[in-house]
Image: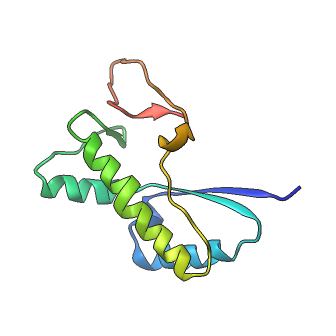
Amino acid sequence: MELLFVIKIGGNIVDDENKLSSFLQSFAQLNGRKILIHGGGKVATKIGDKLGMESKYVDGRRITDAETIDVVTMVYGGLVNKKIVAQLQANGCNAVGVAGADANLIPATKRPVQEIDYGFVGDV
């Protein structure tokens, strides 16, 4: 049976061009099936700021409310995702970028409202 690598990278890598480039070169060289899951929070914050939207956090976690869901979707599923796909392609790794909502690949449920309402952030 062929191995499947599932790797998650966060903002520490995504937000640093050199780290991201180095990581993607290594990732592209992995043999076998692979899935890359990425963040992009700082980019979403930067774009939101330019649009006059204040980012909200509780305990280091983004509160994705109705006002910010469009920005988060554009950044994660568009800008960051396609940038990563293009770099993987440039490194000889055939890649396609999808979001969890595509074909219901990653079903999630919204967390129940507690003392902290995380907006549209859910658990997978």
Placement of the N terminus among the 4 image quadrants: bottom right
Q: Is residue 57 above or below residue 78?
A: above
Q: Residue at x 47, y 40 (%)?
A: 101
Q: How is the image coloured?
A: rainbow
**Residue 119: where, in percent of width, then height?**
32, 30
**Residue 3: where, in percent of width, then height?**
81, 58
Q: Residue at x 33, y 19 (%)?
A: 115
Q: Count all numbered tags in the image, as a single digit.
A: 0
**Residue 110: where, in percent of width, then height?**
43, 25
Q: Residue at x 38, y 54 (%)?
A: 76
Q: What is the residue that sits farthest to the right in this orientation?
A: 1
Q: What is the residue that sits farthest to the left in this orientation?
A: 52
Relative to the observer, which residue lies in front, 3 or 12? Answer: 3
Relative to the observer, which residue lies in front, 99 or 57? Answer: 99
Q: Residue at x 14, y 58 (%)?
A: 50
- Relative placement, left or right, of 62 versus 23 is left
Q: Is residue 58 above or below residue 21?
A: above
Q: Splitting the image into 4 quarters, where does residue 116 fall?
A: top left
Placement of the C terminus among the 4 image quadrants: top right
Q: Splitting the image into 4 quarters, where does residue 122 fall?
A: top left
- Relative placement, left or right, of 119 versus 110 is left
Q: Splitting the image into 4 quarters, where does residue 105 fall?
A: top right
**Residue 112: where, in percent of width, then height?**
42, 18
